[in-house]
Image: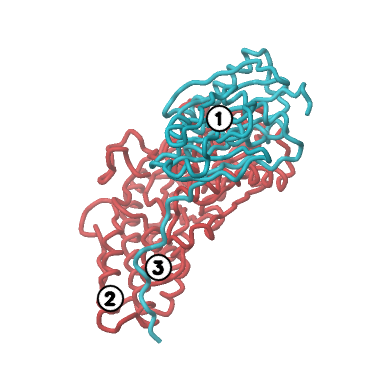
Chain colours: A cyan, B red
Amino acid sequence: MRPDRLTLGFDTSAAHCAAALVLGDRALAAREETMATGQAERLMPLLAELLAEAGVGWPDIARIGVGTGPGNFTGTRIALAAARGLALGLGVPAVGVDLFAARALDLPRPLAVVEDARRGEVHVQVFGPDGPQPPRRMEPSGLAAILGPLPVTGSAAALAAAQTGGPVLAPVLPLAVAIARIAAAAPDGAPRPAPVYLRAADAAPPRSPPPAILP
Amino acid sequence: MTAAVTTILGIESSCDDTAAAVVRAQGDTGTILSSVVLGQADLHAAFGGVVPEIAARAHVEKLDHAVEAALAQAGVGLSGIDAIAVTSGPGLIGGVLSGVMLARGLAAATGKPLLGVNHLAGHALTPRLTDGLAFPYLMLLVSGGHCQFLIAHAADRFERLGGTIDDAPGEAFDKVAKLLGLPQPGGPPVEAEALHGDPSRFDFPRPLLDRPGCDLSFSGLKTAVLRERDALVAVQGGLTVQDRADLCAAFQAAVAAVLAEKSRRAVRVYSGLNPAAPAFAVAGGVAANTVLRTALRAVADSEGTAFVAPPLRLCTDNAAMIAWAGYERMRLGPTDDRTLTPRSRWPLDEDAAPMLGAGRRGAKA
């Protein structure tokens, strides 16, 4: 890791526009604006304001960190497309950081990150002593059997704790700061960021079968 | 004084093609240095049509690759680009958003000016790139998502003479293909089947021909095909290969007849402007259909108007047309930042009365 690597992190995977500029362990500037819609209009001006506040320009950015979700599909793609455009334009890497890793940063292990997945479901990832397990989507009623009394964090942590009886931990860092920190520390050669959906696209093959073709 | 040479990067992602292109323009002429189109047909094939969420998922991961490929093929670096043009509507909003955000990122990083381009303007201005048409010319945009007659008066001034009040013809071809068990997209297989069919076996309706004006309708035609199909299946338990060919031929003949007659009316309205070099241009994937193209050409010939159909790769969705439209827009002077707001609906003639069936959110196109 190069602590002097100026990294810009941002996320629009939920009802917010969040961004942070990080140098080593230090957050030079950070913002999080709550908004249900309008992230596509707000994101780039917000990033420009952040850079101005820190007194740096686009050419000073050495790395981009972007939140990959899971979250709102469209929202996740807004930040992701911007990150890939910035990376291409600046000639610097963009690193995808999923929501679980960002929430869990600097919290003690073992830990479970539980996020609201809408439609009565949650997204869960367990960070055990041996590292993170694959994330999954499930109904909250099944959490107790999987997590036991593990400490929980995330947007659905209270809901999870009500099921499991485990303690609720608050995230240590603002989301965008965590994303930037993780991106800054990532090894070189990371793949281009891609959304983490954990839910297939709503699409069904046609219901009525085609007619039989007679000889 | 020689006009400045301008190099534009175009980006398009409003339906199911992820595209990027580099166009070098000078004065009234443009040269396509590269035009990359990454299709998604295989991703949507199982669903019998484009699934917006699947399209959006593909675009966001293909766009930067498309841009890199277009720059590489053109032999131009980002530093050699003078402006970036991106489709900001109309279309499937998920794809449009990804294209606009990628372009915003690129523009911020490089300091290049960014232009939001109307996808329909891209199609409508293509004949100027390919054939150097002068304004005003008549345009028929006919694709899977659009069908409208426009008089192009200027790069930013289009007058709609009429359009479909329901489905676009390409959509009708897709639906008919689906009804008859043919693959997607439906245009090519329906045309191929029709070659062996008897167009006179079924008497399909010619919607809206009995009404004045240039509006069109295609959804009833699709329903008529469905009825004939079901009648045959009820009697025979299926369709013979010949039934299918005849249904395709009769359907295609009906589409051709309607498009030809409405085109004739549109050409006559346009001719009232007494253009110095009258031209009727057609763009969109449906223009690839030989029977339809022949019918439209015949109308132009009989009305004494030149007929222009750009090569197929520039008739279907591509980014060279977006780059060119961006260039034409630039030449008109500084643009409004609002053009960069992604819009699912964005009619070319915003001040005109809304079309029949336009709905609360405005005209479909």
Q: Say which amino acid is labelled 2.
A: Phe
Separation of disc 1 and disc 2 at Cα? Answer: 57 Å
Q: Residue at x 57, y 35 (%)?
A: A100
Do tags 1 and 2 sit on the same chain?
no
Crowding at mark 1 (Cα within 10 Å: few <14, some 14-19, many 20+): many
* Chain where mark 3 sits: B
Crowding at mark 2 (Cα within 10 Å: few <14, some 14-19, many 20+): some
Q: Residue at x 62, y 16 (%)?
A: A29
Identify residue for label 3: B177
Residue B327 in view here: no
* Chain where mark 1 sits: A
Q: Say which amino acid is labelled 3.
A: Ala
Most foreground residue, B165 or B290: B165
Question: Which dot marks residue A11?
Answer: 1
Q: Where does the N terminus of chain B fall, quadrant-wise?
A: top right
Residue B93 in the image, given as x and y percentages of width and height: 45, 41
Q: Where does the C terminus of chain B fall, quadrant-wise?
A: top left
Q: Nearer the viewer, mark 3 or mark 1?
A: 1
Q: Earlier in the sequence, mark 2 or mark 3?
A: 3
* Chain where mark 2 sits: B
Q: Residue at x 25, y 45 (%)?
A: B356
Residue A54 in the image, given as x and y percentages of width and height: 65, 13
Identify residue for label 2: B202
Could you say which quadrant of the image residue A9 lies in?
top right
Separation of disc 2 and disc 3 at Cα? Answer: 17 Å
